[in-house]
Amino acid sequence: MKKSKTLSLALGPALNRTQELTQRLAAEILSGRLQPGARLPTEQELSLATGVSRTVVREAVAALRADGLVMTRQGLGAFVPADVQRRPFRIDPDGVKSGKDVLQILELRMGLEIEASGLAAERRTSHDLVQIEAALRSIEAEIEVGGNAVDADFRFHLAIFRSVHNRYFPQFLEFLGNFIIPRQILNIANGSDPDRVRYLRRIQTEHVAIYEAIRGQNTAAARKAARRHLSNSLNRYQEISTRASRRAEAARLAEAE
């Protein structure tokens, strides 16, 4: 059994001590300073080294275990697993804030969603079609009352993924959650102004094209419509990100004057 190395884990004045300790321990593991098979310091050792309670230590170790970075053995403690690099895929919603983050998630969606739309056109049932259409109606209703339709938009895409009849498709989308709809992250498309309505109606027109292709069981058209929708989304958010950067720079220069 490998012994744990002496670690430097002094924590700064963070608001969330559990999260900070989790990140520090994860860094030790992923950098190789804590190698596969190594035992983590005990709860008491970590508590004394970091100045946090043993409850915080337990919560941090539980978070590492959930991420596949440690395994616990009854009566022996927590250890770095041999296959630590096979930890579960994860995207932290709190880290998805910048325009670049949004664009990268859109690129990830393109890789899967275009194929999902084609498979949905091929495999969808009449029940699936009802669910997709209901989500479309919900988007339309939210546009009319001045909402941003984020949740309804997510339900639309989730209904398509469920229509593939492959459980991993909806599971993956549910894992990502509705922050795949980037307008909530970039704080756009809110309010009742004409620009907001035009913006959302362009998106809705693209949704309708995907739906109609799936309804007609035209796999090629469904893939094409999904590609157009996501390509247009990439272009829209690239423009939004650029404008936001220019506004931030202008504000910085104004403050400097």
Image (tube, rainbow, N blue to C red):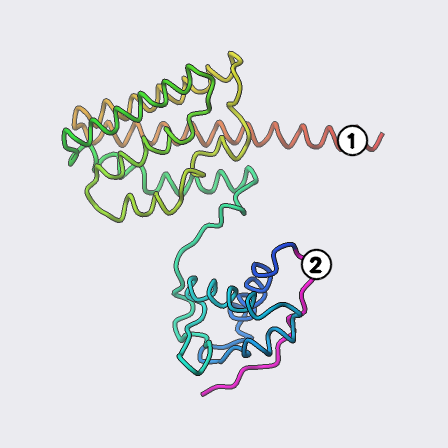
Q: Which residue is mark 2?
A: 13
Of 232 and 23, which appears nearest the observer? 23
SS of the residue at dot 1?
helix
Q: Hey, which quadrant is residue 129 in on the image?
A: top left
Check if residue 215 falls in the magenta segment: no
Report the residue at 40% width, 56% height from top.
89
Q: Which residues are magenta?
A: 1-14
Q: Quadrant where the C terminus lies?
A: top right
- Residue at the (33%, 47%) spot, across then down: 172
Quarter of the N terminus within the rendering:
bottom left
Q: Position of residue 149 (x, y in %)?
A: 42, 25
* Identity, as a three-letter code, of the amino acid under mark 1: Leu
Q: Looking at this rendering, what residue extends furthest in the bottom direction? A: 1
User: Residue at left 55%, top 63%?
Assistant: 22
8 with respect to 82 (left or right): right
Q: Which class describes the residues within 10 Å of circle 2: few (<14), some (14-19), or many (20+)?
A: few
Q: Percent position (x, y) of residue 5?
A: 58, 81
Amino acid type, callout 2: Pro
The tag on residue 253 is: 1
Q: Secondary structure at mark 2?
A: loop
